[in-house]
């Protein structure tokens, strides 16, 4: 079901990663602090709220889900065993006619009404259906400017994650990406499910383990056998592909955690339902939580594969390394 309007304006925004693990060493903390801003300076979109959507709520079954036991701060719930795939998202689009944020061309007249008076019209090259695509540069000047490896790409969407030159043929079992938080909520509504809360996501990610930094326990990400699809080597210039992958991987390529959930670390960041807050007094939050890390995370950049790592992003922004999974309490 198509939105009434989906608008964007390329302005800087901050996506921050931080770890809340109280047992983080001083060395790890220093590394975390140095990479706290994982995607500083990327553009974001502005669009209408979910009240414009008219997606009929479906009835969820528990096929393809795992029951997660109650925790100290979470009740029992069901969670998708893996991220929502291209095949699953395609069924939703075919059933509803839904058009995602990335596929929707902005309307300047509607956008202008949301901007301060006198805001000049962006160049026409910005007023196109587009999304953010990762490009590995030959070299970088530090990691503080992610504009060195992210590009707004015309025609990039869930059907073309890297732009028109790329499609998802023969990738039905890959996680759907280039989907905004709003897109994911619409899918969940149709499926009779919802997005997980941040507390639910972290509890499920731990897989029954306590006081462990990773879903699999204590072993460092690049020790032993590959445990998740992350970046090995010099990010973002060179990837050794020690884990067998350069970019996105199909779901269920690594061992599940203790609850039987796959890919709770790496591959793609996953949207949660919560607004991103730090517990500090200030303005109302404007971005949503993302958890789990992606194929772009490594020790020098992000470390999002830790169970306590957090990221935030504008609810109407899609990325090549961001997807989702759903939960149900029915």
Image (tube, rainbow, N blue to C red):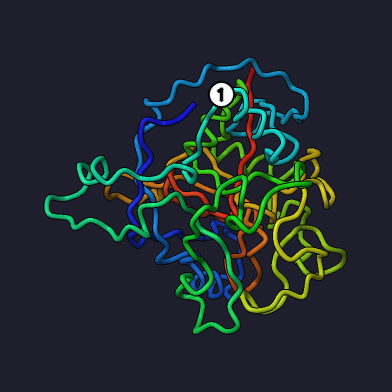
Which image quarter: residue 233? bottom right
Instruction: Indicate the position of residue 82 as horizontal and vertical percent values.
Output: 73, 40
Number of marks present in the image shown: 1
Name the spot of residue 97 as percent of width and height, x first. Answer: 54, 27
Left or right of residue 176, residue 219 in this image: right
Is residue 153 found left or right of 63 in the rendered image?
left
Hey, which quadrant is residue 229 in on the image? bottom right
Pick the residue in front: 77 or 123: 123
Q: Does 229 appear above or below 189? A: below
Q: In the picture provided, is 294 more to the left or to the right than 39?
A: right
Residue placed most toward the observer, 122 or 86: 122
Does residue 319 lie above or below 6 as drawn? below
- Badge 1 marks a residue whose secondary structure is helix
**What residue is at 73 percent from the left and 51 percent from the top?**
215
Say which residue appears at 43% left-offset and 66% top-offset: 40
Q: Residue furthest right?
A: 225
Left or right side of 321 for 174: right
Q: Nearer the viewer, residue 125 or 258?
A: 125
- Looking at the picture, tell me which residue is in the foreground, 155 or 98: 155
The quadrant in which the C terminus is found is: top right
x and y percentages locating residue 1 in the rendered image: 49, 26
Location of mark 1 (residue): 96
Q: Residue at x 74, y 47 (%)?
A: 169
Circle 1 packing at 10 Å, graded few (<14), some (14-19), many (20+), is some
Q: Residue furthest left?
A: 117
Residue 297 in which image quadrant: bottom right
């Amino acid at each position: 079901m198509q939105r009434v309007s989906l608008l964007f304006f390329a302005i800087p925004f901050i996506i921050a990663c931080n770890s809340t693990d109280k047992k983080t060493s001083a060395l790890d903390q220093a590394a975390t602090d140095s990479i706290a801003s994982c995607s500083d300076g990327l553009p974001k979109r502005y669009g209408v709220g979910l009240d414009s959507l008219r997606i009929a709520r479906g009835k969820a079954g528990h096929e393809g889900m795992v029951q997660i036991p109650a925790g100290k701060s979470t009740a029992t719930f069901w969670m998708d065993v893996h991220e929502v795939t291209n095949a699953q998202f395609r069924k939703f689009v075919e059933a509803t006619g839904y058009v995602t944020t990335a596929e929707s061309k902005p309307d300047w007249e509607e956008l202008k009404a949301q901007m301060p008076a006198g805001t000049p019209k962006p160049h026409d090259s910005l007023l196109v259906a587009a999304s953010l695509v990762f490009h590995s540069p030959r070299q970088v000047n530090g990691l503080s400017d992610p504009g060195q490896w992210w590009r707004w790409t015309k025609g990039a969407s869930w059907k073309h994650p890297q732009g028109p030159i790329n499609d998802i043929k023969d990738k039905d079992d890959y996680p759907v990406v280039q989907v905004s938080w709003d897109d994911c909520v619409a899918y969940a509504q149709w499926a009779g499910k919802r997005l997980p809360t941040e507390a639910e996501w972290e509890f499920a990610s731990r897989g029954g383990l306590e006081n462990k930094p990773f879903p699999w326990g204590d072993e460092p990400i690049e020790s032993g056998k590959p445990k998740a699809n992350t970046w090995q080597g010099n990010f973002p210039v060179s990837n050794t592909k020690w884990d067998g992958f350069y970019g996105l991987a199909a779901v269920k390529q690594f061992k599940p955690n203790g609850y039987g959930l796959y890919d709770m670390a790496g591959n793609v960041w996953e949207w949660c339902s919560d607004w991103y807050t730090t517990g500090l007094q200030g303005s109302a939050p404007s971005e949503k939580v993302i958890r789990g890390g992606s194929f772009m995370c490594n020790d020098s950049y992000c470390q999002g594969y830790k169970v306590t790592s957090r990221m935030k992003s504008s609810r109407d922004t899609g990325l090549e390394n961001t997807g989702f999974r759903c939960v149900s309490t029915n």
